[in-house]
Every structure is written in C-alpha cells, then in structure tokens.
Amino acid sequence: MTEFTLYNYQCCPIRPDMTPRREQEMFSGQLEEVDRMALENMERHQELIDRILTTDLERHFVSYRQSSREKGNYEKCLSFYHNRKQYYFKMLLPHYGWPTDGYYMMRIANPRQQMREVDFKRMLQPDEPSALVIIDNRKDQQRILIERTRAWNDTDTVKNILQASIGDVLRRHYNVGMRIEPVWQKNTFENIVRLYGNRIKEVGFYVGYPNMGRTGDKFLTPLKESLRNTYAAAYVRYTVPKDSDLGIKPKRKHGGQNGTEKRKSLCIEADNIDPVMEEMAEHCRTGGLPMKIALTEGHTLSLQRVPEAQLKRMTEEKRKLYEEVNQVYSTYTVTMSDNISQFDGQDDLFGRVNDTVQEKLNELRCLVLK
C-alpha cells in the first residue's frame, strides 16, 4: 500500500502595503481598488487555483532543464522553485484531453547527485526520486495528499515547496495568501487533556480568516461572519481560573500543614469538554490550524510540527515534554493501492487510477476522520 500524509490548505485576502510611504505613492482610490480586488479574488480563490493548475500552468511554472538525451541541449519542463532550488514536476491528472473534476495529481522530483561505482570507477550521477501529490480543490475541500517516499525524509518539505510556489502566484497576481498545514488524528485534543488534566491553565485556538464552510458551522458561524466582514483572523483564548478566582481558600489540614482543595476547571475534562471549545478544537484539527496549551509550570505546548532545528535548540526538559505530546499528537495518514504509486501518466492505467483517486477523495469528503 502507498501512504500519504493528509494536509489542508487555507487562503486569505492580503491587504495592500499601508505604510505612510506607500500611501503617498498611491492615491486612496487606488488602495481601495486593490483592497476590493483582493476581497473579490478571495471569494473565487478555488477558481483561481484551478486556473493556475490548468490553463495558466505554463505561464507560471514553465522552465528549462539540461536534456538527458542530448548533451548540451535544454528542454522545456515544469518547475517549482524554493530556497533557490529547482524541483521538476509533471502533471498526471487531469489526463491530457480530459476535463478537470477539481482534483489534480502531480509527481514532484527532488533532483540530486548520487555517487555511483561502475567498473571500479566512482562517479556522480543524477538521481531524481519523486513523490506523488494529490490536490483536492473541489468546493470546501482544499485537501492535499503527499506521498511518503525516499525522495524526501519528511513530506513537510514538499508541503513547503507547494506553499511557496503556488502561494507566490496567488500573492503576486491576486493578493491572496495560502497556508498549508497537516491534519491531526481524531481525538488529539481530548488525549492532550487526559494527559495533562489539572496542569492546563490556558487553551488558545487560531480560527483564521474563514474560507471554507465544512467546519465550525454550529457555534463558529457568527465569529466567521465577523472575521469576514472585518477582514481579520482570530485567536480565541480560554483561561482556566485560579483557585483564588473560584473562591477556593487554603484549608487547614490535620498536623498543622496547609493545603488546598483539588484545583477545579470550568471545561477542561476530556470526557466533558465544553461544546464550543470542542468545535474550535475540531476546526483547528481538520484545518491544520495551530492550537496552544499553557501549563501551570510555565511551559506552552503547540500542536504543530516542530522543525528539527528547533528541536535541537530545546532544553532537555522541553524536549521531554514535546516527546510526551508527540505520543498523542500525530498527523492523519491516507493509504491507497500501489497502482497509484506506479502511475506516471500511462494511458492504460489512467482510468483505474482516476477512479481510485476520486473514490478516496470522496471518502475523505464524507467521512468524519477518525
């Protein structure tokens, strides 16, 4: 079976640069026009992504590479650029001559040189392992599946390439931002609450600029409308009251020692979480949005991927805490048959691959992720 890491992407309008110098360079009417266009483009951001991946594909990503067949010659190709490195890619779905159904599949290569030994001679030879990427851009879906292969040690690297490349086109041409984050496993928040219990003193949820309707429809709808109307994103924070806030006073124990009643909580119980908080946690989980939990001893847990470089800078105590969190926080994995991994655009495999991909995306669309 072929494994994919599941991601979600969010978009938001980007306002024009409002620095005093910028305001002097542009008339107020021009600023208002740019502002208005950003909002209009945000309303059709999925349509714009469809265009970027189809009719405008070569306009934004056409490049050239040295030919593998004729030395010294160059051939046209499609490439993403990230951190000054070129990543070749090939579109596999939609198939040539077929209409798009709102989802796409591409293969992205990681070009490098590998040392090989042939006839007792060592030489550097090109190696271009690739990973499959499936993008579901249908209404309110906005999911990305990235194959786990030897091409990259971490699928987040591919995520960063997509975010930088497609996001750059959206930003430069349409004033729309793009953010891609991994989806968590179900019950992550409940498991964190079970693990830390009364040590939790604060929980924060990043709601973000609303651009999808499939999460947070019961309690978050008024907040989403407010964010949309005010061109904003929100961070909602719950502070668990201290003992003194609840009127709990130190109690005199037998033997002359002071003590207190067990610290109480308003809604931080894994089996009885406040419905609004539960909806916010689910909104963050399925959208890959950050959530932070502050503990009484002063540490803060962030339910997000932590880069390796940041892990190395952590103290031993902080690293141990992160490892505890990692036991209950993991990203969502999708599996598909190996014929998906073997597909490279072959006509005889197209029909079966297209049906398999569509079936899996529809399953994710209808299923409550567990």
Image (cartoon, rainbow, N blue to C red):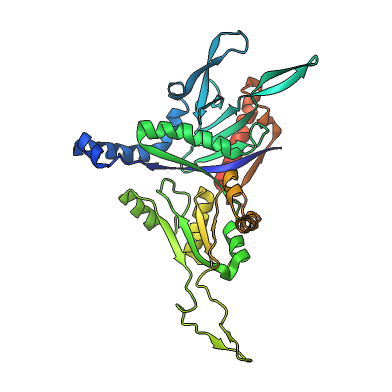
Q: Does residue 98 lie above or below 14 as drawn?
A: above
Q: Quadrant of residue 325?
A: bottom right
Which residue is rendered at x = 40% and y = 54% of the image?
234
Q: Does residue 65 lie above or below 338 as drawn?
A: above
Which residue is rendered at x = 57% and y = 8% of the image?
72
Q: Is residue 3 left or right of residue 231?
A: right
Instruction: Point out the residue furthest to the right here.
Output: 120
Q: Does residue 15 lie above or below 62 as drawn?
A: below
x and y percentages locating residue 273 in the rendered image: 54, 66
x and y percentages locating residue 259 in the rendered image: 58, 84
x and y percentages locating residue 70 in the rendered image: 61, 7
Where is the N terminus found, in terms of image quarters? top right
**Considering depth in this image, is 354 or 17 the residue closer to the camera?**
17
Q: Quadrant of residue 144?
A: top right
Q: Is residue 98 left or right of residue 153?
A: left
**Considering depth in this image, is 324 or 257 the residue closer to the camera?**
257
Q: Does residue 63 lie above or below 49 as drawn?
A: above
x and y percentages locating residue 270 in the rendered image: 59, 66
Which residue is rendered at x = 38% and y = 51% of the image?
233
